[in-house]
Amino acid sequence: MKNLAENKELLKAIAGTNNEYYNVEDFISDAKKYIKAIKEGRMICIIESVSSSGMSRVLKFNSCEKGTKTFSYRSYSLLFKTLGYKQARNSWGFTISGCGMDMIFHTNYTIIHQLHKYGLLNKKDCDKLAQMTPTCL
């Protein structure tokens, strides 16, 4: 894995989350949890809304996590912010623009390739996970 603590692009993106407590270690942890959830088929995408033109939608990616006695959902909002996605107003979701394709597939495909670029995935895993579309609600 590349030394992400010295990656100026990543450090600038983390600073752009406007969360003083989020750092490179948190980013790596979130990325690894995202990757694991995709591998295990636990990633869920919730379509909160679609614009009237159909050109954008608000998506929220969560993974189902098993606790000691209950299940919970993990949000990836700071990971998405770091990767350059725009958080929707009054929502934990993110505005994704585009039409004419499966935008959930495209969003996951793009995220997986970004994580590969940062050295968090090898090429074989990147190619496989980029093709795994999260379950949609």
Image: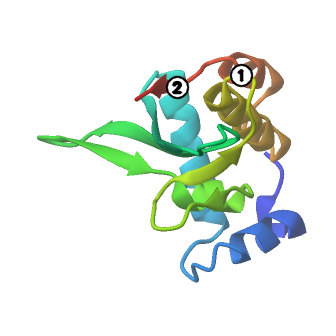
| Nearer the camera: disc 2 or disc 1 | 2
Q: How many C-alpha atoms fall within 10 Å of the one at disc 1: few (<14), some, or many (≥20)? A: some
Quadrant where the N terminus lies? Answer: top right
Label 1: state its secondary structure: helix
Residue at 58% across, 35% down:
35
Q: How many C-alpha atoms fall within 10 Å of the one at disc 2: few (<14), some, or many (≥20)? A: many
Residue at 64% across, 72% down:
17
For disc 1, the marked residue is 125
Position in image of residue 112 (x %, y %): 71, 35
Distance CA(mark 2)–CA(mark 1): 16 Å
**Image quadrant assignment for residue 80:** bottom right
Pointer 2 with pointer 1, Cβ within 8 A = no
Q: Amino acid at mark 2?
A: Pro
Position in image of residue 33 (x %, y %): 51, 42
Q: Is residue 93 above or below residue 134?
A: below
Which residue is at the front of the view, 42 or 125? 42
Residue at 39% across, 48% down:
74
Q: How many marks?
A: 2
Label 2: state its secondary structure: loop
Instruction: Describe residue 57's horizontal placement relative to residue 97 as left or right.
Output: left
For disc 2, the marked residue is 134
Q: Amino acid at mark 1?
A: Asp
Quadrant where the C terminus lies? Answer: top left
**Image quadrant assignment for residue 120:** top right
Which residue is at the front of the view, 101 or 76? 101
Instruction: Describe residue 47's horizontal placement relative to residue 114 as left or right.
Output: left
Position in image of residue 106 (x %, y %): 72, 30
Which residue is at the front of the view, 115 or 54? 54
N-terminal-most mark, 2 or 1? 1
